[in-house]
Amino acid sequence: MTNQYQPLTELNQIMDNNKDLDQTDGDYIDSIPLDTFEITQNDYYKIDNENEIQLNMSQLNEMITNNVNDDENNDVINNLVVVPKEKSFSFKQLRSFLGPALLVSVGYLDPGNWATDIEGGSRFGTSLLWVLLFSNIIALLLQTLVIRVSLVTGLNLAQMCAKEFQDNKIMRYSLWLISELSIISTDLAEVIGTAIGLKLLFNVPMIAGVIITAVDTLLFLLIQRFGPRKLEFLMLLLLSAITSCFIVELFLCKPSAKDVFKGFVPSLNRDSVFIATSIVGATVMPHNLFLHSGIVNSRSIGKDMDSIKQACKYNIIDTFLALNCAFFVNASILILSATVFYANGIEVTELADAHKLLGDLLNSKVGSVLFGVALLLSGQSSTIGGTMAGQIVMEGFVQIRVKSWLRRLITRSMAIVPAVVIILAMGEGATYKLLISSQVVLSIALPFAVIPLIQFTSRSDIMSDLRSPKLMLLSSISVALFIIILNFMTIYELIHDLLQSTLAIKIVTSVILIPIVFLLFLLLLYLISYRHQQKILKYLLINRK
């Protein structure tokens, strides 16, 4: 069967054969940056009956010329890292694949994660460590699916969704808007976290700190122009610095090994459901699925199935190492909170309180300073991934390409406005709850990225020999069900609490929130069943007769 998602393999081979590649490991190709989605249009090639690609060379040359002159051509999404050719496993080849998952892993360390981990640790001790571990396993599974589908098709997840729903604009734009909302929610956490970090370390007022975040990440965007390897190295430095801070923090607080191991025994109650959901959203993060699907093709590999399978193995190793490092940091934050705050009967309601109390309870100013440094670094590092994910989502779903700095300012502005409004209206203390709520939004948005991903990777017409085996498929479906059930439990508890509040909140909940939840539910049902609607209708009609 012809794969309708067949990538442009022959073109890549032509480019490789006609280019003197004498670069060493770690160099990248930037002379012919190609936008995958544009290349895969029939204007540039067609597949004949023998599955051979016929190129319209005049249009192709024009496109290449336009892309070379585009000042966006030096970003990490378009450049290719040259991979040394090896027939079997080699550490030299593995080294060339290490890096993309670092950009993903820093997203799991954003200030939203900090808020959920500190809240969970200070209120419930180590009892939610199992949620962190399970969320990390979910992230590893889903990122594995992302790696497989992206390498096989040459497309990112947003492009896949746009292609699948090209005749259904309502679904395509709905998925795009939900994805954009998740990116804005992530950016909101990064804005607030960076502002709090600036206040803790340099006593910068929160409002000023929020405004500073409007321009600070533009400096990081400049690093993209130096290629993917430089950006990945920067992420490695930031991740190492954050990890080092928490190794010292754990040494200072001396947690009980018995309490830590007890935290990996699953337990959940009505009070901890909301925090558990926010931990899942903060750990898995839908925008990271889009991000990884876009950057995993940053390595120049052969397009035969053996090369793709080998690239999958290397990328999975990269993902395993990076995500487990992020898990260590998140677990450290929760353990630190449980050991220092929960053990002393203190419930933390602000990150600033956590910073101050750490210094007092540990009898060491080093602990509080390291906390502030790590918080600032996490806010800055995770914004880079958010920017790149925003580019991938916008270009993939609606084929709108904008400058990186403009995209950054648009997204950040949409995060800054609610942050400023809430700080002015409710005070700085309200930003902590806003951080946690933003992570719940991520969890609610997660199924709308996960379900298409599971569907794509289970189809032989897309994945060919790399379609998900039965065990992986069953595991993926179980993960999706777990996320959906947890979301419904959280939404039920939230609506129940809101309906017990003031009259104004009851009206807003009844008129706005409940209808939105109902629409999301219908959209989710359609997303799950759209490929089987004819069978379902036929079954219903037969039973009706």
Image (spheres, rainbow, N blue to C red):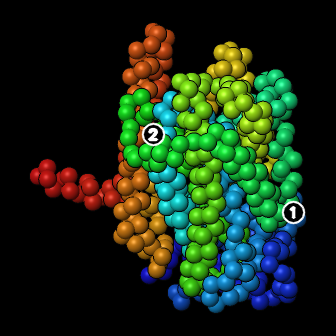
The residue lying toward the viewer, choosing from 147 and 65, is 147
**In x, y percent, where is residue 197?**
77, 34
Q: Earlier in the sequence, mark 2 or mark 1?
A: 2
| Extreme residue in the left direction | 545
Q: For the residue carrying disc 2, how many other residues have a C-alpha within 10 Å: few (<14), some (14-19), or many (20+)? A: many
On the rendered structure, is 376 left or right of 475? right
Can you identify the residue that label 1 sits on? 226
Q: The residue under label 1 is which amino acid type?
A: Phe
Asked if 488 appears above or below 328 in the picture, the reply is above
Q: Residue at x 81, y 36 (%)?
A: 214
The residue lying toward the viewer, choosing from 541 and 494, is 494
Mark sitting on residue 96: none
Indicate the quadrant where residue 498 lies.
Answer: top left
Q: Residue at x 58, y 74 (%)?
A: 312
Q: Secondary structure at mark 2?
A: loop
Asked if 170 appears above or below 225 in the picture, the reply is above
Q: Nearer the viewer, mark 2 or mark 1?
A: 2
Q: Residue at x 48, y 33 (%)?
A: 124
Can you identify the residue that label 2 sits on? 127
Q: The residue under label 2 is which amino acid type?
A: Ser
Q: Residue at x 41, y 17 (%)?
A: 499
| Residue 348 appears in the picture as rendered | yes
Asked if 310 appears above or below 327 in the picture, the reply is below
- Give how far apart the Cα atoms at labels 2 and 1 are: 44 Å
